[in-house]
Amino acid sequence: MKTDDKILKYLAGILEGEELIKFEKELSEDSGRREQVNQYNFFLADVNKDLKQTVSDHYFTSLLPKVREKISAKDRSNSLYGYFRYAAGMAMIVLAFFTGRSFIPDFQEMDSSLLTAFEIQEIMNSNGNEFSLYLNERDLTDFSQYSADFSHYDESLLDEFMASENSFDETNVLGILDDIVYTEQLSDSVFNNIYDQLKGKEIF
Amino acid sequence: MEPEKDIDLVKAFIDGDESAFNRLVFMYQKKIYHIARNITGNHLDADEVTQEVLIVMYSKLKDFRFEAGLYTWIYRITYTRAINQVRKNSVRKFFSLDDESAQELTSSGNFVHEYENREKIDRIRTVMDELPVKQREVFTLRNFENLTYEEISSITGKTVGALKANYFHALKKVTELMNENR
């Protein structure tokens, strides 16, 4: 099949205005030209059909049990990790009580004008339990389903934002590698949005 | 029997009907797999992405608010995970961390049914793999999933104009490469 830029532009929806009108007129008057366009459509349908055949139905019948198994394993692991977090949190409270040291960071001092998600991740990692204590003290009770696993906060937060059609735009994300989100630099408002969402979560 | 609606299944799932999730999986698993397969270019990555997406669906459906279509939400997750998988592979390839596994990734023959037109399918796959990711993704979503540019734009965050241009170049390359490989 000969490559014809005009037909390809037409199929891609690039032709506009007079050029489109002229081409559609050509199609209505020239059956040969119509046949060429049809050939492209048949070709694409053929490619589509062939590519959809590349995996067996057996794969799909075995997919759900595999996923179910992973979900159960994740639930078990989350529940164990929840106990661990609770114990760690209690240890921090006891430590804070006996040492009199404040573990609550002053978040107001953070320069959030241009924080990347990586930096936010670093903040979470370095503050860990202190951050959760801070949030608990503020009696932030929404989003009770959330479990504060800061080491994995990136993906779960990301998914949550996607689920809620929030203004956090996943297209900002350049990639997730080793549990770190690499993004374009976040604006102040996006950071505040993330911060507000995190504030709204029940940690333990 | 009338096909079940997304909204009913999601509501049933939120209300504790686990089988509703199974039905959603049956409805969307092939679509998820094919998008992932076409963007990542191999079965192993597509399998990983598909499983990840289904797990995300399971844990996040309770937060879904139907402000956008369920399929758009699922496509967006699939698209992002697949693109991330491609990037991870590029990083691995760049540092040559696992040449052997990379070789394994490209030869997914063990997982694929033998078909009479296997040679033809392999040729198309080769052509698809030669497309830049930007072109491959729009070609996949537009041609295979029959999505409009506006829908693709809401999934990928790219402008309609850029998508049209990428689709045009993808079409051109696919036809040229298929002609060359004949």
Image (cartoon, coloured by chain):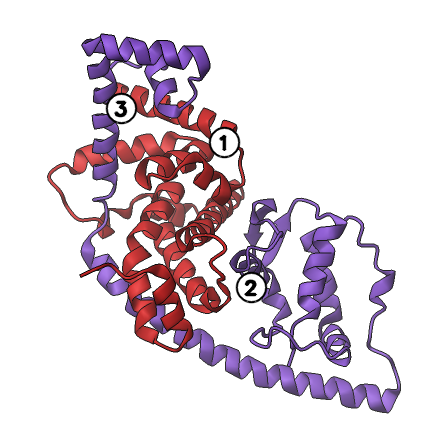
Eyeballing the image, is A146 above or below A46?
A: below
Secondary structure of the residue carrying tag 2 is: helix
Q: CA distance from mark 1 to mark 2?
A: 29 Å
Dot placed on the residue nearer the N-terminal end, 1 or 3: 1
Q: Position of residue B156 (x, y in %)?
A: 50, 42
Q: Residue at x 68, y 59 (%)?
A: A194
Of the two numbered discs 2 and 3 in the rendering, the one whose residue sits closer to the viewer: 2
Contact check, label 1 and label 3, Cβ < 8 Å: no
Q: Which mark is residue A127?
A: none
Left or right of B131 in this view: A109: right
Q: Position of residue B47 (x, y in %)?
A: 34, 55
Residue at the disc numbered 1: B160
Q: CA distance from mark 1 to mark 3?
A: 26 Å
Q: Tell me, what hue is chain B?
A: red
Secondary structure of the residue carrying tag 3 is: helix
Identify the amino acid type marked 3. Answer: Met
Q: Residue at x 32, y 56 (%)?
A: B28
Contact check, label 1 and label 2, Cβ < 8 Å: no
Spot the purple chain and give its letter.
Answer: A
Circle 3 packing at 10 Å, graded few (<14), some (14-19), many (20+), is some
Q: Quadrant of the C terminus of chain A?
A: bottom right
